[in-house]
Image (cartoon, coloured by chain):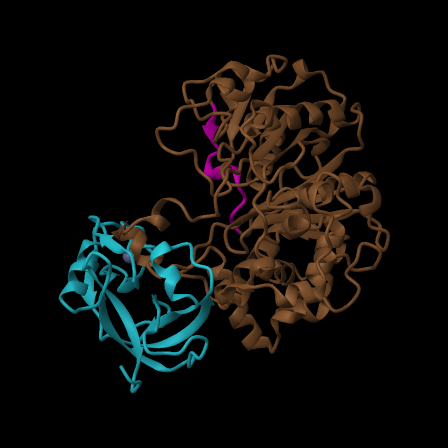
Amino acid sequence: MKQGVAPDDLTRPFWEAANAGRLVIQRCAACDRLQHPPSRRCGECRADTALEWQQMSGRGVIQNYAVVHDSPVRLLQADQPFNVAVIALEEDNDIQLYSHLPGTPVDEVPLGAAVEVIFEATANGQRVPEWRVVGAEA
Amino acid sequence: MKAHRAPAAMFRANEGMGLWEHRGKVAAVGIGHSPTARRWDGQPETSVGAISLLALRRAIEDAGVDPAAIDGLVLDPTTTTGAHWPKGRPVPAEMLDAFAATDDPLDGLAQLSAPWVLKNMPELSGVKFAMHGDGCMTRAICVAAQAVGDGLAHTCLVLKAWHNYAGRYGQGGASAGDALPGNVAIHALWGTPVCYGTALQFAEYCRKYGKRHEMMAPFMENSRRNGLLFPEGYWAQHRPEDITAEDYNTARWIAKPANLLDNDLPIMAAAAYLFTTADRAQHMRQKPVYILGHASSRTRARSMTATLDEVEADTARTARKLYEGAGISAADVSFENMYDGFTLFHQFHIEGLGYRGLKFGEALDFYQTDISIAGPNPVQPSGGNIGCGRTRFWMHTDCIQQLQGRAGRRQVTGVKPEVAVSGGPMPMGGDFMVWSATPG
Ligand SMILES: [Zn+2]
């Protein structure tokens, strides 16, 4: 079970969208550039005036992964070992999100495989974007 | 005296800055180390403050300098290895009795400040310049080198110290809680240990270049072997144990492909150096080691974790900055002491530098050749964090000692020690130095 989330001002739109079953990513309208993790300024032009939230398709590919055997997070230790993959988004494959890849056996991660977003409840009920290999059993 | 954080302008983070304006005009002379310990035993005389004062006094004595003649002090105020003094726990009475306090009760206990050091070392009566170089010994070194070059100080101490308390690394605080702040949750919800990013980069490296984790074993053996020849180090002082290939290949995974031995051991220790101008250095007790240049990387990953492409582009950029500033090329480097905490990124550093002509993807094959201190291609003669414990300063001490010819049983014999490179921590986002036995 993932730890709960207490949304802060910066990331609240991301978490509220997740609770509504949508994946949104921060975008600088001035640069037409996505960025994640969210920041108060655009990483390119440094402006803080043109940042907005854009809905994503929820499609991506598995770019990389490692298998966590010794997590510092108490709530996750019962699930060890577990995959933590890097998902590259369809809209911009330099934009990454992490995933436990529910349904994918440990250390049998199909690199390059297509994934689609799902939303998983955390310890306090806040939902969080997760990813499942397209065509895999739920 | 107040100490400010070093301004960004003191670091050479851009390409095209040309030769460092103080090339060969600043020298390291004195070295002082405290003893090491795995964790604090609660006694004032082994506190992070006490070991800092000890290291500073040893560096002064080593250089043979009158303490009153010292006019500069640069240190990293952060001393945590990941362990924090619990909120609300009172400062032990023994600490209050043993040291002159500043207005921050954690000074000397869980952090440092230049004012705390100066209050507790009254013999440093002439210090007029004090600055904080946050993050690492390497960053403090850059600040001190620049300060001496710029004339802000002529005789400057540089200090880095670490404290470690009981408890498992990184398992307290937010990791033990039921909920995370939203901005932290973005990356921390997945429960990755600190080595995860490096593990990812190493996994990508192995796939791209057809390498395997076991190929790191000779590097591990070499690092610990060198570290056991470092009398100031933790493993030499407390646990004189080799690492064998079998030890390495059977160590438990932390974030596969990073195992337990790919992670260094948090310890308590302090080290200090005495820097001065090249002119003044001629009259001190030890042979001067000249700084030819320093360079910094302030590059950030585009998204969650730097990809291999991002890392390689940045290590190559760092090498260009470093060589340009020092007025040397890779062929001039006698040996390297780049950072190793985590071991799985050492190859990024040395491939970026083109050490011994290495190109990307070649370092693990290089590790299968003679990389010992007796051979022509020494890799990390300091032993680094793997050989000595996590401090991020062994590499600098070793460079200075090797170029002074006083590295003892660790002295490189397969090459003439003339020019050395050291620095870190991360391949993306670190500070780096070129040291030389001559002013250039
Ligand atoms: Zn922008």
The quadrant of the image that shows the C terminus of chain B is: top right
Which sits in the foreground, B262 or B144?
B262
The residue drawn where x is 57% and y is 59% is B260
Which sits in the foreground, B35 or A91?
B35
The residue drawn where x is 33% and y is 78% is A103
Q: Which residues are magenta?
A: B3-14
In the figure, B86 relative to B98: above or below?
below
In the figure, B330 relative to A65: above or below?
above
Which sits in the foreground, B52 or A33?
B52
Chain letter matching colour cyan: A
Residue B68's x, y, as percent?
66, 13
Residue positioned most to the bottom: A135
The residue drawn where x is 72% and y is 62% is B244
**Quarter containing ligand 1?**
bottom left
From the image, state the color of chain B: brown
In the figure, B86 relative to B317: above or below?
above
Which sits in the foreground, B384 or B417?
B384
- Position of B63 with respect to B120 (left or right) is right
Q: Is residue A46 magenta?
A: no
The residue drawn where x is 24% and y is 54% is A5
Residue B253 visible to the viewer = yes
